Image (tube, grey):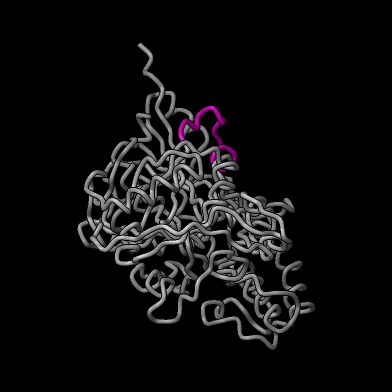
Amino acid sequence: MKASKGRNVVVVGTQWGDEGKGKLVDWLTETADGVVRFQGGHNAGHTLVISGVKTALHLIPSGIMRPGVKCYIGNGVVLSVSKLLEEIAGLEKAGVEVKSRLRISEACPLILPFHVALDVAREVAREQGIGEKIGTTGRGIGPAYEDKIARRALRVQDLKYPERFATKLADLLDLHNHVLTSYLKTESLALGESLAKYVKNGQVMFDAVYSEAMAQAEILRPMMADVSRELNEAHANGANLLFEGAQGTLLDVDHGTYPFVTSSNCVAGNASAGAGVGPGMLHYVLGITKAYCTRVGGGPFPTELDWQQPGTPGYHMSTVGAEKGVTTGRSRRCGWFDAALLKRSAQVNGLSGLCITKLDVLDGLTELQLCTGYRLDGEAVDLLPMGADDISRCVPIYEVLPGWTESTVGVTNYDQLPVNAKRYLERIERVVGVPIAMVSTSPDRDHTIVLQQPFSA
């Protein structure tokens, strides 16, 4: 008898990233047989806290912390092999088996040292007045996606063929070294210690890149796979799959606060293209949403507060919430919850349910403000506009709600939440029009309230 097909869930961030997706992916993996990354690169950062032990992941899916769960890196991810191998080594040192459980799409574009050099040099140029600084992580993500779209990228599969790799690498270096030296003037720029062994007189050297790539290829080869085929076969055989998004919807290159965005599509629909599965295989979309808003880097943020002044709500969010970027260590800007922003995210992702995270961070605030819309050039709007220019002119319209003094840390039963915490959550649900499926009350895996299990909904 043919096995019944599996049930699949997509997890996406609904704000500007850093919503706590890693913990929820790890929690949901108890019901999953495989976890899939489908976009982004090592600019993502997911923090898991399991039995009090903190683990940070940047490329490997969060399901790696669950024994026996298969992990997949789909074709939509841009891959730094160096960073991947560093992450594998760190996990193996902690006793986690990785290589036998990790499958990497041969179609993943590679991030190479010249991509990092371009990224860093461009941000330096912007600081010096050539355009407005975006606030990238400086890890080569954008330039790697540029090569993909221009149909000239080196991909994982090229590592299997040294001569082909060498030819393509030489062509790419001719192009990018010209940009680095002639336009970005890298001979006079400090590109950082991590690039020192690859760069001479402002140019990235062929031998340094090629020799490292060939050494890495032998380690990577057993993990290379036709991920699309493996996922479709797993689904047909009854496996439950979890598709793990990186960054957040408002950083999506099409639907975010452009141009202050990442270089990939972060929305749920990209799980299909970025992993090689049909849209019909995506059964439930869970939107991870912080109980307030944060943002790293440049770009408009309508509900931003003064988060550096002690004694203010923004400072409370920043300090109690430990709002530092996992990948860069940069402080996150903090602000009130923005329901009009979340309505936009719900629209473009087709959200089935919400998971509200970091509710416990709001403990002790006597008053909360909830943005339900904006004034834009004198007119009331109830949905986040498209693009940074319009968003930067938005003036929030707030509802004021009472806060609570009781602790919500570690609560696992909805009825045990303070009355005002429940009223806050229920108001979010009504304004946005999407049911709350889960609530996270601390970074710990087990501190989770479940109202609807996405795999059985």
Q: Is residue 394 above or below residue 454?
A: below
Q: Is residue 27 above or below residue 94?
A: above
On-image quarter of the N terminus: top left
**Foreground of the two, 59 or 452:** 452
Q: Position of residue 399 (x, y in %)?
A: 49, 57
On-image quarter of the C terminus: top left
Which residue is rendered at x = 46% and y = 45% of the image? 287
Judge whether residue 359 is colored magenta. no
Q: Position of residue 292 (x, y in %)?
A: 44, 60
Which residue is rendered at x = 55% and y = 82% of the image? 192
Q: Position of residue 289 (x, y in %)?
A: 44, 52
The magenta-colored residue range is 270-284
Residue 14, can we see it?
yes
Q: Is residue 407 above or below residue 208?
A: above
**Foreground of the two, 1 or 214:** 1
Q: Position of residue 313 (x, y in %)?
A: 41, 71
**Foreground of the two, 90 or 136:** 136
Name, please, the residue furthest toward the right: 182
Which residue is rendered at x = 52% and y = 65% of the image? 295
